[in-house]
Image (tube, rainbow, N blue to C red):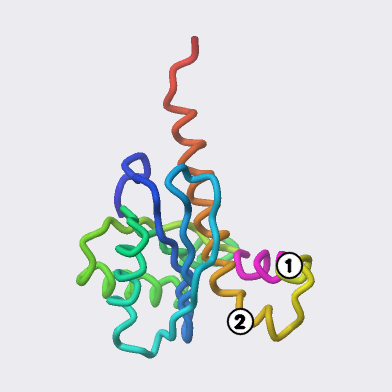
Amino acid sequence: MVDLQAAILPLLALDIGGKRIGIAVCDALGISCRGITCLHRNDRQWPQQVLAQAEARGCHGIVIGLPRNMDGSEGTQAKDCRQAAKQLGSQCPLPIYFQDERLSSWEAKERLYAQGFNEKKVRLKIDQTAAAIILESFLARKASSSRRDVPST
């Protein structure tokens, strides 16, 4: 994993699941994050598709949601996610960062229902919305760690 402070915006974020990969992006200032698409994980070209999305948006790094258990430990899903990150990293020159993604899918579902989406629309948008939430969390953590590094006057 790369140093959090070194992350240069804009960034792409991934919510890697067993079947789908949600993708989100932030703007160059890190102010807004939005889901952009969803890829099928069983497509062997998904790493190249992720890289193409990052290049098309001028991204300087990729944030991957790491699904931890509620106690903070890593289970089989986290191991699978780390393996997918390794696969992506072997084909991608961009730095990869991990972000705890506990409850991101639940929060994504809540946000989408609050926006008035029906069950079908929620299913279509949940992965990319979860990726946006992962990216928001990463940027908040980055901002928080930056504030701690500034000396008090």
Q: Is residue 17 magenta?
A: no
Looking at the image, residue 132 lies above or below residue 85: above
Say the numbered circle drawn on residue 98: none
Residue 148, compared with residue 17, is above or below; it is: above
Q: Earlier in the sequence, mark 2 or mark 1?
A: 1
Q: Residue furthest front?
A: 56
Numbered disc 1: secondary structure: helix
Q: Which residues are magenta?
A: 103-111
Contact between marks 2 and 1 (CB within 8 A): the answer is no
Image coords of residue 2 (percent x, y): 29, 50
Res. 114 image quadrant? bottom right
In the image: residue 61, left or right of residue 124: left
Q: Picture coordinates of residue 20 (x, y %)?
A: 48, 82
In terms of secondary structure, where does tag 2 sit?
helix
What residue appears at the point 46 percent right and 64 percent down from the top-left corner?
66
**Which secondary structure is most common in the magenta stretch?**
helix
Q: In which quadrant will I find the N terminus?
A: bottom left
Amino acid type at circle 1 is Glu
Q: Percent x, y for residue 71?
A: 57, 61
**What residue did someone put label 1 on?**
110
Q: To which residue does mark 2 refer?
A: 124
The three-letter amino acid code for the residue at tag 2 is Leu
Taking the image as shown, residue 89 lies to the left or right of residue 122, namely left
Number of numbered labels in the structure image? 2
Decide: is 7 above or below 134. above
Residue 94 percent coordinates (x, y): 26, 58
- Within 10 Å of disc 1 (Cα), the crowding (few <14, some 14-19, many 20+) is few
